[in-house]
Image: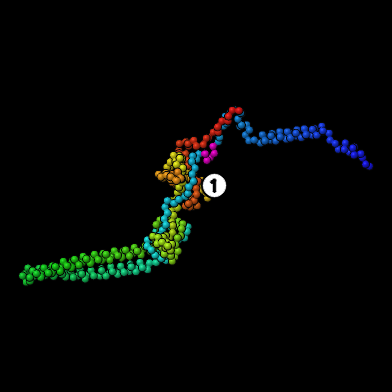
Amino acid sequence: MSQDPQVILEQLRLERGATVVRGKRRRWWLAALLLIAGGAFWLALPNRQDIPPQGAPPPPVAAAADDTVILDATGYVTARRQATVSAKVTGRVESLFIEEGQQVTAGEILARLDDTDARADLDLATARAGAARAELPDLELRLAQAERDVQRQDALVARKLTSSQQAEDARLAVDSLKARLRLLRRQVAVAESAVRVARVALDNTVVRAPFGGVVTVKAAQPGEIVSPISAGGGFTRTGIGTIVDMDSLEIEVDVNEAHISRVSPGQAVETVLNAYPDEKLPARVITIIPAADRSKATVKVRIALLARDPRIVPDMGVRVGFLPLDGVPPPPSLPVQAPPLPDP
């Protein structure tokens, strides 16, 4: 059944007043939702009762645990006692007894060089000293005989049985033998000194640890030539390895010269290694090095670690917090109370 188009249009037309009523209802709903959300937020606020009324001064801000630190700095772990160990003589490495991370004691043998030449020199010096000592008994016997001849000649001269010239010749022979004996004894002493020198040269082919510590660098291999001085060209090693005394580890930091007045020897320090950020290690200032770095405007400070930890190794990065001195309040670097709010 068909309808009149005019009637259909009349049915689809909306009244203008109905649209306004619906818009008002939506705004009321939105206002109600905002009020509900605001109330929920107010209820969720912690410590609502602690909020001061308007115009009242705010309460002091609670200081955190790190607020006691009056100065922060960064630096590195260093070893006060470390050495690159080398042989005293130039030679070829025959044996090497170290590895990285090995604990060594003072005087322990680290390496041996080829000692063929040194041993041959020692044998030659020993032989020369033996030959010089072998001449001593013969010369001493001849001197004793010459002294007896002098006594006989003196007796004959007293009895006028011989001339005084023969007695003088006998005494001259004694003096000559005594001089030769002194010279020979000096030669024996020189030969024995040469033996000692040869023994030292032989001992220099053995490389020993100068102090106890940990091997951090193994710089040579068997068969390489090592020398106490650089020979150039890059073919000669100047060291066997590096030893670090882990008991001498300390911290060096650069402090801005504008804040160096806050640092004093003996001051307590908190240190945090970059490798272990969750652990704080106690430390104390050793000294302030009396020299400034002009390019960086800093002063170097040495800090002693009070707790030894095998995980701490040289060249580790560290963050340092200087604590206030006992009985001395920290300088007012940061306010401990928030400024008052301006009046509305």
Whether residue 190 is visible: yes
Outermost residue toward the right in this view:
1
Left or right: 229 with respect to 148?
Answer: right
Residue positioned 40% across, 62% down in the render = 231
Q: Where is residue 236 in the image (x, y as percent from the top left)?
A: 42, 63
Q: In which quarter of the image is residue 93?
A: bottom left
* Residue that label 1 marks: 278
Q: Position of residue 200 (x, y in %)?
A: 34, 63
Determine if the magenta segment contains residue 66: yes
Residue positioned 15% across, 69% down in the render = 173
Magenta stretch bounds: 63-67
Q: Quadrant of residue 266?
A: top left
Left or right: 53 with respect to 96?
Answer: right
Residue positioned 14% across, 68% down in the render = 172
Outermost residue toward the front in this view:
6
Q: Nearer the viewer, residue 44 or 84?
A: 84
Determine if the magenta segment contains residue 217: no
Main SS of residues in magenta: helix
Label 1 Cα neighbours within 10 Å, binned few <14 / some 14-19 / many ≥20: few
Give the amino acid type for the residue marked by disc 1 in the picture: Asp
Q: Is residue 271 above or below residue 10?
A: below
Could you tell me which secondary element the residue under label 1 belongs to?
loop
Q: Nearer the viewer, residue 257 or 104?
A: 257
